[in-house]
Amino acid sequence: MTSVPSPTDIARDVLGIEGEALLKMRDGLPPAFDEVVELLLKVPGRVIVSGMGKSGHIAAKIAATMASTGTPAQTVHPGEASHGDLGMITSQDAVILISNSGETRELADIIAHTRRFAIPLIAITKKSESTLGQQADHLLQLPDAPEACAIGMAPTTSTTCTLALGDALAVAMMRLRGFERDNFLAFHPGGNLGAQLIKVRAVMHKGDALPIVHETTNMGDALLEMTAKGFGVAAVIENGILTGVITDGDLRRNLENLMGRTAGEVATRGPRTISPDALLSEALGIMNTNKISALFAVDTAGRLQGLVHIHDALRAGVA
């Protein structure tokens, strides 16, 4: 009696088959890859990515990854394209069509449209001799590797390789464009990704909202300033330079004759600070480590620029 493999054994088989295909594609990257990247970097319009069925889902992901990493891109459904959406594909664009067999009939109208208007066409397919492979200006051929499903027909290995190839294109263009963390934040203002890339200057309090006293300010006035601004701290500055901070802890340590002292006499020297251009997550880390609830932001010369409170980080989703 034939034993039935466990789900874990099946999973290992699937991952092994797909992993081998990815390594095969890495070691035999399509020769046209560099040309395709160079072409897409110069496209004045957008990169249009399309496919049918499972290839369509992969196309949508590739387009989304490109769009979020600096390459204007969108997906066009081939069925909708045949009913009016071909107008979304202009002579300023480049088109990437995905079809494992290269004979997906729903792609015919997009292929014809690119040929009619001389729109660059890039094919991702396993079959170089297919209609798509022959019509394309550039061919990114998938490795000749078996699908990972039991019957060898369900798109598994082929879609994994296509997705990875799309990631390779997007990341190559991202790096060649010099697309950095700041650019990434501009396209990801919401969610955890955006929150983790927010800078201190984006949320810090500044100007009249800052609790500021001077070295010679009497503590009566300093307490009024701390109370009015509501952060539980005050910055001691001279000529715009942060020279110390007064916290609730400083008040408790100096209760004796507190009102007869100056802000400079009570302040803690050498306070922990942060750059306005530092990530808000870094500021939160400093506050958590040192068990403080507010942090002053200063420039490279030590001039006071702002204040960030732990509540600002929490409101921004950095936790």
Image (spheres, helix red, strand yellow):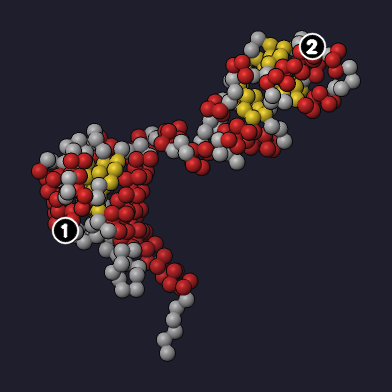
Is 291 situated left or right of 66 in this image? right
Asked which secondary structure carries label 1, the reply is: helix
Residue 265 in the image, given as x and y percentages of width and height? 81, 16
Q: Is residue 291 left or right of residue 203?
A: right
Q: Amino acid at mark 2?
A: Asn
Do tag 2 and tag 1 residues touch (Cβ < 8 Å)? no
Q: Residue at x 64, y 12 (%)?
A: 240
Q: Report whether 56 appears left or right of 316.
A: left
Residue 29 makes an appearance in the image: no
Residue 278, image x, y percentages: 56, 30
**What is the x, y in percent for residue 9?**
46, 73
Which residue corresponds to mark 1?
A: 105
* Secondary element type, mark 2: loop
Local packing at callout 1 (Cα closer than 10 Å; few below 14, some 14-19, many 20+) is few
Q: Which mark is residue 218?
A: 2
In the image, residue 5 sits, relative to residue 126, either above or below, namely below
Give the farthest residue toward the bottom: 1
Q: Specify the farthest residue to the right.
A: 256
Residue 128, compared with residue 184, is above or below; it is below
Closer to the camera in the image, 244 or 187 = 187
